[in-house]
């Protein structure tokens, strides 16, 4: 028996001051109407989305929930006292093949976990953090958390991520159990390509998630490539960036009971969308998505 878990930063936050404040428009919003985008997302048994920080992106996610994901949760993203937006996180799950169900476990309310450490730059205006829930699969329980960490390359951004990783480690300890599998995924904004793993923030990341396996480490594919020959949409908003592996799916097996194992990983939205012609507007997001397959 198999099911899939996908993670995708949908690039749903406005890129102008007006769009950030009004919370209405996402960049090149026609991409959310693309049949290719809708079908790829709908094909996931569990879909974890980051950056649902505009009306356009939230309508997109809510449309998926209405049609494909009867079990779902997302942040309301309302204005806060110290922030303009919420976490921008959402999880959708659905019934899958062979009458097996992967669903948000109703008996365990989802928990939105904003980082206590304030972000810097634009991130200080969002309540970045984690969304924790539990899944039911074949009568067993699986812990799931999707996260979105501080973006940026500055010293202040790195310090913010260090503090956020400490909070993430504490959440995993508090909410997880060695008797249940645990999947942690999302946009960590930490470079994980092999050439740069031996130092810096990646070591902090794997230390915070000790006992977890980085499912994308072996394939070592970038998920963010702001270059005209990589992802032109990402390049439009970041002219000097290099190829980076910022998005991850981590897995920790249960010590007993459910013998869930990962059986595959692929990248998606790493090519232009044929339904939207050519150029910058034909890309689904500035990030590529990841989809892992698990089986018993």
Image: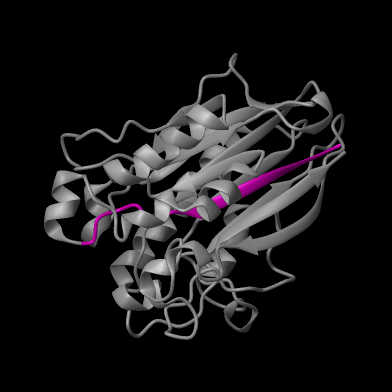
Occupied quadrant, residue 105: top right
Question: In the rendering, at what x and y percent does residue 259 appear?
Answer: 87, 37
Question: In the rendering, at what x and y percent does residue 163 appear?
Answer: 40, 54
Occupied quadrant, residue 217: bottom right
Point 57% across, 54% down: residue:
208
| Chosen colour scheme | one colour
Please tell me how many numbered marks the rendered image carries.
0
Above/below status of 118 relative to 81: below
Which quadrant does the N terminus fall into?
top right
Between 218 and 31, the one nearer to me in the picture: 31
Above/below status of 178 relative to 36: above
Magenta segment: 1-15
Q: Is residue 37 visible from the viewing direction of this image?
A: yes
Q: Is residue 11 visible from the viewing direction of this image?
A: no
Q: Using residue 69 as the reference point, say whether residue 263 is left or right of it.
A: right
Q: Using residue 269 as the reference point, say whether residue 26 is left or right of it.
A: left
Looking at this rendering, what residue extends furthest in the top direction? Answer: 107
Whether the magenta-drawn stretch holds residue 35 is answered as: no
Whether the magenta-drawn stretch holds residue 9 is answered as: yes
Point 47% across, 64% down: residue:
287
Between 44 and 84, the one nearer to me in the picture: 44
Question: In the rendering, at what x and y percent does residue 290 appear?
Answer: 61, 58
Point 44% across, 39% down: residue:
61
């Amino acid at each position: 028996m198999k099911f899939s878990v996908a993670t995708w930063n949908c690039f749903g936050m406005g890129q102008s001051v007006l769009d950030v404040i009004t919370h209405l428009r996402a960049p090149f919003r026609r991409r959310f109407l693309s049949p290719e985008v809708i079908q790829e997302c709908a094909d996931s048994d569990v879909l974890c989305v980051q950056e649902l920080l505009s009306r356009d992106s939230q309508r997109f996610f809510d449309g998926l929930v209405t049609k494909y994901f009867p079990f779902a949760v997302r942040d309301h993203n309302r204005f806060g006292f110290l922030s303009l937006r919420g976490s921008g996180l959402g999880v959708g799950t659905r019934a899958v093949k062979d009458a097996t169900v992967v669903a948000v476990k109703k008996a365990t309310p989802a928990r939105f976990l904003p980082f206590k450490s304030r972000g810097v730059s634009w991130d200080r205006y969002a309540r970045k953090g984690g969304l924790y829930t539990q899944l039911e699969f074949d009568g067993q329980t699986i812990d799931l958390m999707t996260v979105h960490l501080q973006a940026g390359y500055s010293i202040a951004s790195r310090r913010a991520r260090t503090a956020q990783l400490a909070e993430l480690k504490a959440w995993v300890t508090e909410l997880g159990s060695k008797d249940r599998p645990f999947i942690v995924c999302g946009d960590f904004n930490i470079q994980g390509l092999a050439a740069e793993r031996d130092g810096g923030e990646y070591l902090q990341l794997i230390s915070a998630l000790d006992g977890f396996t980085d499912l994308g480490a072996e394939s070592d594919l970038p998920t963010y490539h702001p270059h005209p020959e990589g992802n032109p949409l990402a390049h439009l908003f970041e002219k000097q960036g290099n190829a980076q592996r910022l998005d991850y799916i981590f897995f920790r097996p249960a010590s007993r009971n459910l013998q869930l194992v990962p059986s595959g990983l692929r990248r998606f939205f790493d090519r232009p969308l044929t339904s939207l012609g050519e150029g910058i507007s034909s890309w689904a997001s500035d990030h590529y998505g990841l989809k892992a397959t698990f089986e018993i």
